[in-house]
């Protein structure tokens, strides 16, 4: 499923204003020692590298192995938004996380290093809750390609270190076993970006259902988009930022019971990757 196409609709694009579970964080002087994702005791599944060792890309699970769906939530604040957080803007969404817990919905959170810096207690809570798995969404939420919804870009020779820096920040916040999964900011990638991350041992995780919750004000419209898009094995992209995705908690409260009525079971991304026949 490796493709150099950059998929995503404008409604899902996260500009410099978008964040998801919260973030901001210390300016981060210097560069931390490289840190690769440490496997958990369960040895989470990953996809085999592509031709020439290219970073593999995962978009959805099997369509014929039962009605499973993974809800994913991005924490994608850009590295320069610390002043906005300091001024009182909320880039986290505790109510959403509480709702997921109350509804007993497992989920995968793609966390930026800046988010972990800003909200270490929330990062630690997610990282110690077996209902969730925490994965990497870069440190800075800068784009890994040009022309990615107005995001600043990471130079090719810094892409790898940006991902490693994010793992360092996530572990420092108290997440003991961040998953070996990476989501490109804005969903934008190309062959150069996939090559830059080769050897890190990560699987790049995209999606096949765009919720449209970013900057949305009409929760019902987002609900319809999700319900119309979900198929067996789907990966749904959503966000957990109060300021940039204010409807998401309401969307989850409607979507979850409806999908359960339709026979769907909620799983984490790792289960879908494992069902694909991935290696461990």
Image: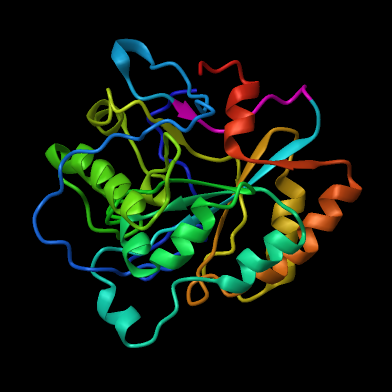
| Location of residue 247 in the rendering, given as x and y in whole percent from the top left corner | 63, 72
Q: Is residue 85 magenta?
A: no
Work out which residue is located at the far top of the displayed protein and give it. Answer: 51
70 left or right of 3?
right
Tell me which segment is drawn in magenta: 57-65
| Location of residue 130 in the rendering, given as x and y in whole percent from the top left corner | 61, 46
Above or below, 242 relative to 50: below
Residue in front for this viewpoint, 196 or 162: 162
144 left or right of 266?
left
155 left or right of 220?
left
Secondary structure that dominates the magenta span: loop
Work out which residue is located at the far right of the displayed protein and give it. Answer: 261
177 left or right of 169?
right
| Location of residue 94 in the rendering, given as x and y in whole percent from the top left corner | 57, 72
Residue 194 is drawn in which quadrant?
top left
| Location of residue 96 in the rendering, given as x and y in whole percent from the top left corner | 63, 68
Residue at 35% x, 35% y is 37
Residue at 50% x, 30% y is 41
Residue in front for this viewpoint, 63 or 199: 199
Residue 277 is drawn in which quadrant?
top right
Q: Is residue 64 magenta?
A: yes
Task: Confirm whether residue 145 shows in the render.
Answer: no
Residue in front for this viewpoint, 51 or 87: 87
Protein image colouring: rainbow
């Amino acid at each position: 499923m490796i493709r150099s196409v950059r998929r995503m609709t404008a409604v899902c694009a996260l500009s410099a204003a978008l964040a998801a579970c919260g973030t901001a964080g210390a300016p981060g002087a210097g560069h931390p020692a490289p840190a690769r994702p440490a496997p958990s005791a369960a040895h989470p599944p990953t996809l085999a590298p592509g031709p020439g060792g290219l970073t593999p890309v995962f978009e959805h699970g099997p369509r014929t192995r039962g009605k499973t769906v993974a809800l994913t939530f991005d924490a994608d604040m850009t590295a320069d938004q610390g002043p906005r957080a300091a001024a009182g803007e909320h880039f986290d969404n505790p109510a959403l996380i509480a709702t997921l817990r109350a509804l007993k919905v497992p989920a995968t959170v793609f966390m930026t290093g800046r988010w972990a810096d800003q909200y270490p207690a929330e990062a630690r809570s997610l990282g110690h809750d077996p209902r969730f798995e925490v994965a990497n969404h870069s440190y800075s939420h800068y784009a890994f390609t040009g022309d990615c919804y107005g995001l600043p870009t990471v130079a090719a020779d810094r892409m790898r270190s940006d991902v490693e820096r994010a793992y360092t920040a996530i572990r420092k916040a108290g997440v003991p076993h961040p998953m070996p999964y990476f989501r490109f900011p804005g969903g934008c990638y190309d062959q150069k970006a996939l090559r830059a991350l080769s050897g890190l041992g990560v699987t790049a995780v995209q999606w096949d259902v765009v919720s449209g919750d970013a900057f949305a004000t009409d929760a019902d419209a987002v609900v319809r988009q999700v319900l119309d898009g979900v198929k067996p094995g789907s990966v749904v992209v959503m966000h957990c930022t109060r300021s940039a995705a204010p409807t998401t908690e309401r969307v989850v409260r409607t979507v979850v019971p409806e999908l359960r009525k339709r026979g769907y079971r909620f799983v984490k991304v790792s289960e879908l990757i494992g069902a694909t026949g991935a290696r461990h």
